[in-house]
Image (tube, helix red, strand yellow):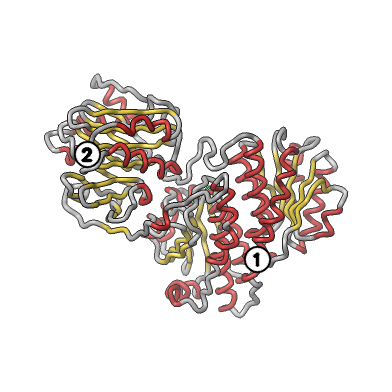
Amino acid sequence: MCGIVGYVGEKRAAPILLDGLQKLEYRGYDSAGIAVFDGKILHIVKKKGRVKELEPARALRGNCGIGHTRWATHGAPSEKNAHPHTYRKFTLVHNGIIENAHILREECLSRGEIFSSETDSEVIAHLISDCYEGNFAAAVCEASKRLQGSFALAVLFGDCPGTIVCARRHSPLVVGREKGGLFVASDVPAIAAEGVEIFSLGDGEFAALHAGEIQFFDEDLRPVLPHPVEYSCKEDAPALGGYRHFMRKEMSEIPAVLRKNSVDFLSNSQFSAFCEVLCHAEYIQIVACGTAYHAGLCAAYAFEKICRVPCEVSIASEYRYRDPIVPQNTVCFAVSQSGETADTLAAAQIAREKGAFLAAVTNVAYSSLTRISDAVLLTNAGREVAVAATKSFNAQLMLLYGVAAFLATKKGREVPPLAELPQAAAGALEVSEEVRGWTAHFLSAKSVFFLGRGADYFTALEGSLKLKEITYLPSEGYPAGELKHGTLALIEKNTPVVAVVTQRELAEKTMNAVHEVYARGAKIFLVTRFEELRARKEVFASVLLPACPEEFSPAVAVIPLQALAYYLSLARGNDPDKPRNLAKSVTVE
Ligand code: F6R
């Protein structure tokens, strides 16, 4: 992951780098650094921790520089391992993973070269220096040929103080141009502003930023055409708007986001080509990671239940290495909030190469995923700042449920009323405040369990993931009926168990499991839409969800679980927006 930014032009570089890095902190925030040329000297400032630690460097003079915010892969989060890294006259920032770094490092060491960090990135500076024969860009190209893995690079060279050379393979990078200045960044928001034209760098391409001009090259230094990116400056200025944290604010937007994603695929001509293919689909595959994978599981449940089309959901990092079978007439949905998740991109590409029609379900119109897909379904959830996904999950569900509703209609099958979801979500948000009172019972827990059956099982999985990522409490989402096959052994006196019960036919079955854990001392917290279950003796506390179609209930039932994670995270003194060890966009394998 990591975030890269660079600037060369008429303005002072340091403020541009620091402001850009702030906007890229969602990509990692364990250490940060900048390097700025003041005409004579290259000043490098690095700090462990967040970008704000670099604030004193804002005063640095100089019009050319690069910056980095890190999510550690090779080497612990520390000042020493923070970027930029320098070898001789070359200084660089890197996003990605160099898989043959250990071999290359050994080679360098055998030549007597000295390393000052444990990172895989530093070896790139060594290679560039070793490849340099008088042409800066050529040295970066040559060095890149020796790298295995993924990289986005911005490189400075002591002998060319007004030039930045950039390169990318499997990691995103964009460059920008305004009157009097040039930029490079991992993502558009870092450099987006009125008057800035932005271009994405193609996979395997290079760019040289110098004297107001950007030159684009392929791997053999042949000129290539730029790929302009359309973007709007307006959409990228999220503010807290009175909330303490983005996560809570983003949850409050869920009803509106569901409304925005109520797409009528029957009448919307924008999707006619996609709908045509979908109508002939014999098989559906969904690839995704994390929360998006859970959205995929919920969607697959709806596809099978209401459309009766077989649907398989895969964790993208598994799909990509298992030589997947893609039957004829397969539509593959790649679900990704960011559209940049490396594993999802790779899995999507494989599905497409094997003949699937690839539909992207993403929140970012100019993402790498949109560029490789046959159809793009934008979730229009607005930018999600909190690392823990909330509104984007609900948005993905609404859009995919809309697709399922369309397909079911085409097949002459009954379609549950999807339009009820935004209202039900608003009701769920209201009752979610009640879970604040639950947190005291979770604070000293060794582990937490979330149980459910059918669609509720997927809600349980997502509730558990949210809890883990922002409270750091061990937690498991479990199919209620499977507990007795081993996991029940973990239940102790006062172990918090959250049971999700929204499926009429399965309600009593889930309550059997509730009874089993209660009998072993667990404390039961119920999230249900059945009033009568709340009075059962096993139930310690409960929230009552508004009614909504059972097939689509995860879009509503997940809300109290998101709230539970949020309030528990606060109670444990964590920052729910920026959990430890994580980043919003996972652009490495
Ligand atoms: C969890 C979370 C992650 C992401 C996962 C995929 O709250 O945010 O699990 O869902 O990293 O990210 P995208 O959707 O950007 O592909």
Examine the rendered structure and indicate whether residue 285 appears above or below residue 481. Answer: below
What is the secondary structure assignment of the residue under circle 1? helix
Which is more foreground, mark 2 or mark 1? 1
What is the secondary structure assignment of the residue under circle 2? helix
The residue under label 1 is 423
The residue under label 2 is 140
The alpha-carbon separation of the residues under discs 2 and 1 comes to 55 Å
Task: Name the residue rendered at 58%, 72% in the picture.
Answer: 405
Q: Quadrant of residue 84?
A: top left
Task: Name the residue rendered at 53%, 35% in the picture.
Answer: 580
**Residue 131 visible, this orientation:** yes
Q: Tag 2: Cα neighbours inside 10 Å, few (<14), some, or many (≥20)?
A: many
Q: Is residue 191 left or right of residue 377?
A: left
Residue 455 picture location, percent across and down: 67, 59
On the rendered image, what quadrant is the C terminus found in? top left
In the picture, the disc for residue 183 is: none
Q: Which of pointers 2 and 1 lies earlier in the amino acid sequence?
A: 2
